């Protein structure tokens, strides 16, 4: 492991806005009241990477709490450090495996979920690892409030098509869908947030897919 990664892993252990493993379990059902000290809605970004979307969402909506979730602490470090430096109080990062989501959040605790540029896991043998596979969708349904939306933003046409198929198979409700976000009428201040990797995709003329759906 490189020196930079080791340094970042060491630093995030002291960051007040980074929660790990057992500390997160203690907050299950109590994130707003005990961690954020308010009663604002709670939104998750899954596989948040460097936390660019999480931090920008928090900047845009100070009346909402945001938690970025990723297992790679050296990535989380960037978003957490930015939030500390800019004194953004409504953002936190949880370092866990996403498949353990229900160990950290109670039923109906989450208002929305964002999935931004996840690994599409293109191999058929890895379908269960796709963040919009049925096993993950069942988890989201448990923690989301009634009619709470899930947003998928991806450069992967495969994942976009696959997710649309699962939405149809499971009888979920599609609220918005496009395979070319920036040439659609859907793009707004929130959807215009661009991560480092998204900027690279766009520079290479890659289309960006977007889906918004819910379980009601």
Image (spheres, rainbow, N blue to C red):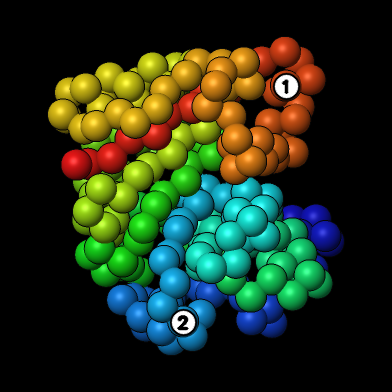
Closer to the camera in the image, 148 or 198: 148
Left or right: 135 as drawn, with respect to 37: left
Q: Is residue 81 visible?
A: no
- In this view, 193 is above or below 26: above
- Residue 119, numbered label: none
Q: Quadrant of residue 174?
A: top left
Residue occupying the far right of the picture: 3
Name the residue carrying label 1. 202
Instruction: Name the residue: 49% across, 85% down.
Output: 37
Q: Quadrant of the N terminus?
A: bottom right
Where in the figure is residue 181, as x and y percent of width and height? 57, 22
Closer to the camera in the image, 175 or 179: 175
Secondary structure of the residue carrying tag 1 is helix
- In this view, 90 is above or below 119: below
Where in the figure is residue 135, as x and y percent of width and height? 25, 42
- In this view, 14 is above or below 136: below
Secondary structure of the residue carrying tag 2 is loop
Q: Are marks 2 and 1 in contact (CB under 8 Å)?
A: no
Left or right: 86 as drawn, with respect to 152: right
Instruction: Name the residue: 35% across, 69% down.
Output: 104
Q: Is residue 141 visible?
A: yes
Name the residue carrying label 2. 38
Question: Could you give the CA–CA distance between mark 2 and mark 1, rounded to whole angstroms?
Answer: 38 Å
Where in the figure is residue 80, as x and y percent of width and height? 69, 66
Q: Quadrant of residue 26?
A: bottom left
Left or right: 95 as drawn, with respect to 160: right
Estimate how packed mark 2 is, as few (under 14), some (14 to 19) or many (20 or more) residues with alpha carbons within 10 Å: some
Q: Quadrant of residue 125?
A: top left
Instruction: Name the residue: 64% across, 41% down.
Output: 189
Instruction: Name the residue: 54% across, 58% down.
Output: 68
């Amino acid at each position: 492991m490189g020196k930079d990664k080791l340094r970042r892993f060491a630093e995030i252990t002291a960051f007040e806005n980074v929660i790990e493993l057992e500390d997160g379990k203690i907050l299950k059902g109590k994130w707003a009241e005990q961690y954020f000290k308010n009663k604002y809605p709670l939104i998750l970004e899954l596989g948040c990477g460097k936390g660019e979307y999480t931090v920008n969402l928090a900047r845009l909506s100070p009346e909402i709490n945001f938690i970025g979730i990723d297992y790679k602490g050296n990535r989380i470090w960037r978003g957490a450090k930015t939030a500390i430096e800019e004194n953004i109080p409504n953002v936190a990062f949880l370092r866990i495996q996403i498949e353990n989501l229900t160990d950290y959040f109670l039923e109906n605790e989450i208002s929305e979920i964002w999935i931004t540029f996840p690994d599409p896991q293109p191999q058929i043998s890895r379908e269960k690892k796709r963040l919009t596979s049925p096993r993950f969708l069942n988890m989201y349904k448990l923690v989301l409030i009634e009619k709470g939306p899930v947003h998928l933003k991806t450069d992967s046409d495969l994942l976009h098509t696959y997710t649309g198929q699962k939405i149809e198979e499971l009888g979920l409700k599609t609220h918005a869908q496009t395979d070319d976000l920036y040439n659609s009428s859907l793009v707004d201040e929130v959807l215009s947030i661009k991560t480092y990797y998204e900027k690279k995709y766009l520079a290479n003329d890659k289309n960006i897919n977007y889906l918004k759906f819910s379980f009601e």
